[in-house]
Image (cartoon, grey):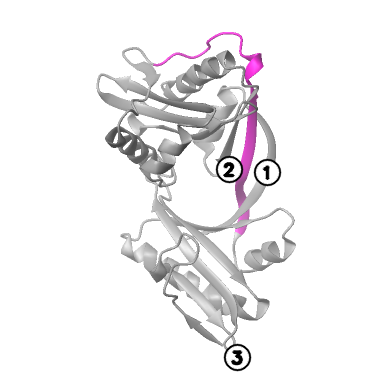
Amino acid sequence: MRIYQPLRGVGAAYQENSFIVFDDAGVEIGQGGLEFRVLRKVYEERPLDIEMIMNAHPAASDTLYGALIARAEQIKEENDNLPARLYTRCALNDKEKYDYFLNMGFDDRDGVELFVRQVADVVQRRNYPPTGTKCEDADLHTRARREEFLQRLKSLGDEPHAEEWLADRMRFPVFCAKVVLYSSEVAGALLITGSQQEAEIHMIGVEPKWRSKGVGSAMIDEALQQLKEQKIPYLVVRAQRRNQRMLRLLKRCQFEWIRTEELLLGRDL
């Protein structure tokens, strides 16, 4: 059995964070990689967020896992030894993967949770932006403005996306991009896309100094009013259980928990 770093990364992982395992006959029997982000504004206590992607035959699992764990520790060292959370996605019915990672010291405290808000239930505005601020549509008229908006979402914890991705989303039947401004300072940002049947909050983030002041609730209320005018029946959001601040916001805005969609088996580094 041999393990190599491939010429290209596995999935969205970079080449230096990826591994492939071959058996003695030269047949590939496993591959995996690590994706990581520093999310200081989302997870202050453990800002280094490392996702492990691992697909392997049982004979290759331990070898591949060992390489990925060692690389995860190196990534932590390369990022000033920031407290880190290492996790892997696991379907609810994947008992084999669940048992394997729990045996390796991972826990099952985190998951992707689905919440829904019925737009038709909206009667009137409940939440307004803080005094001195205003909630308005984000200016996305130019490429530079779209890139700036994406960079802000990324800084608040969103997945990195190219400007072309946002331009494509702007052509969806439902598109809503909001910001809360204090003069020229952006206090929060919101992005919603979807169809006539259902809209989804892709990202909502509030700058740390503006948290607990009603910025997030105001953006959601503003979006609900717009969706109601468009006769969109549902607004959904998928949130990580680890993000307790987000879960509290959804509760305040009367979202209903529907189900856990997948587990995020993890361990602290």
Query: Magenta stretch: residue 71 in it?
Result: no
How many discs mark residues in the rendered view? 3
Going from the N terminus, do you reach mark 1 or mark 3 first?
Answer: 3
Give, as a three-letter code, the residue at label 3: Ala
Q: Tell me the residue that label 2 is attached to.
A: 241
Question: Rounded to the nearest whole Å, what is the CA distance between mark 1 and mark 3?
Answer: 41 Å
Question: Rounded to the nearest whole Å, what is the CA distance between mark 2 and mark 3?
Answer: 43 Å
- Discs 2/3, front: 3
- Quarter occupied by the N terminus: bottom right
Task: Tell me what residue is drawn at x 60 percent, y 91 percent.
Answer: 25
Going from the N terminus, do you reach mark 2 or mark 1 first?
Answer: 2
Classify residue 231 as left or right of residue 127: right
Crowding around mark 2 (Cα neighbors within 10 Å: few <14, some 14 to 19, many 20+) is some
Task: Tell me what residue is drawn at x 32 percent, y 21 percent.
Answer: 181
Residue lying at the far top in this picture: please name it: 124
- Magenta residue span: 107-129
Residue 163: image location, x then y, percent: 36, 41
Q: Tell me the residue that label 1 is attached to.
A: 260
Could you say which disc has been placed on residue 25 in the image?
3
Residue 202: image location, x then y, percent: 51, 36
Task: Tell me what residue is drawn at x 33 percent, y 16 percent.
Answer: 133
| Labelled pair 2, 1 in contact (Cβ < 8 Å) | yes
Residue 83: image location, x then y, percent: 40, 56
Give, as a three-letter code, the residue at label 2: Arg
Going from the N terminus, do you reach mark 2 or mark 3 first?
Answer: 3
Residue 112 placement: quadrant: top right
Residue 254: image location, x then y, percent: 61, 22
Query: Magenta stretch: residue 112 in it?
Result: yes
